[in-house]
Amino acid sequence: MKPIRNINSVQVFSLTAETRNVTRAAQLLNISQSSVSYHIKKLESDLGYQLFHRTGQGLTLTDEGVELAQHVGRGLEMIQTGLDQLSIRAGAIRIALLPMFSSRWLSSELGDLIEQYPDVRLSMHNHNNNYAYMPEPGSFADIGIQWGKGDWNGFEVHPLWPERMALVCSPEYLERHPITEPKDVTGCTLLHVDDTGMWEEWFDLNGMKMVHSQPQMMLEDRHFQLSSTINGLGVSLFASWLVQEELESGALVSPFCRDFETSYAYHLILPRLKASSPAALRFRDWLLENRSKADRLLLSPSEA
């Protein structure tokens, strides 16, 4: 059998053809937009055909692009089916994880899982809180952790625990921007990751409306948001237990010395359109049984 050249470029092309959007394809693949463009141009150069028409309205497939997308789609589907069957037989499980959840809680608990189920093979895949929005989440992972309100169609959804949010900033930022009451936050730079939903909820909870012209900074992930907050770039909202260590060390401060209710939480989710493997179901049951161990982390800074 001849080796397939540019297999990575072929996969990038397939998802770009499906979404017709470079930005969306990059998000789903967890790579940069420039990487998507590079792979598309490389594939076009190797084939000698233009695969997309590029217009101000986005991307449309050329005739050659349509033909290639059909062949590639069928081929990738067969490959995924084979991988899924072998994974089930081997007791393997692919888990879509949020890096901060993994490092702050899951990594310390996995020893118990491995001890209980030594035959399970874990494969961890980070995502930027977009697992629930992927066109085919089951091809990325068997099960995932997602942050949000739990309103995702097509998934079996299990909230892990109720959350409390802390508004935090660095001591230096607080010195430059005194915050003594909620209205003072309107003069601060708001740091967030993928949307402003949590900030809108916080302002509503405090009897205000968020003004979208207020200075904001959208960051790639929670780790980047945390380091940016510590380095004095603005104020952030975090689940209280996630920043407990930084609050205790003094790297961060909570101006109001209390946390706030939120409708957001971490959820365990499984795609409904894909039959869950025995290994995935074991992981689900294990995590749901062990979530009570997180109780010690859910104390707010003011209650600890």
Image: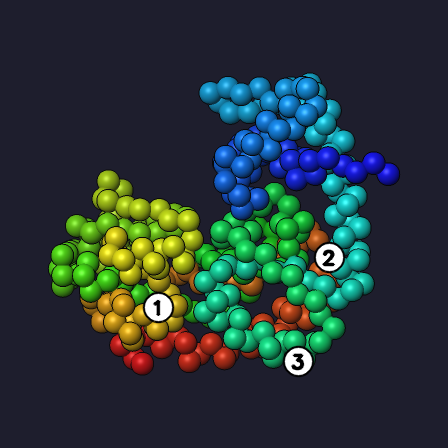
Going from N to C along the chain, the mark reached first, 2 or 3, is 3
Up-down relation of residue 49 to residue 155 (above or below): above
Residue in the picture at 14% in, 61% down: 175
Relative depth, front residue between 50 and 263: 50
Up-down relation of residue 54 to residue 141 (above or below): above
Q: Residues within 10 Å of mark 3 (few under 14, many from 20)?
A: few
Disc on res. 286: none
Q: Secondary structure at mark 1?
A: helix
Disc on res. 243: 1
Q: Residues within 10 Å of mark 1 (few under 14, many from 20)?
A: many
Residues under labels 2 and 1: Cα distance?
Answer: 36 Å
Q: Position of residue 202 (x, y in %)?
A: 29, 57
Reading the image, the residue beneath label 2 is 275
Q: Amino acid at mark 1?
A: Val
Disc on res. 115: 3
Going from N to C along the chain, the mark reached first, 3 or 1, is 3
Relative depth, front residue between 64 and 274: 64
Q: Secondary structure at mark 2?
A: loop
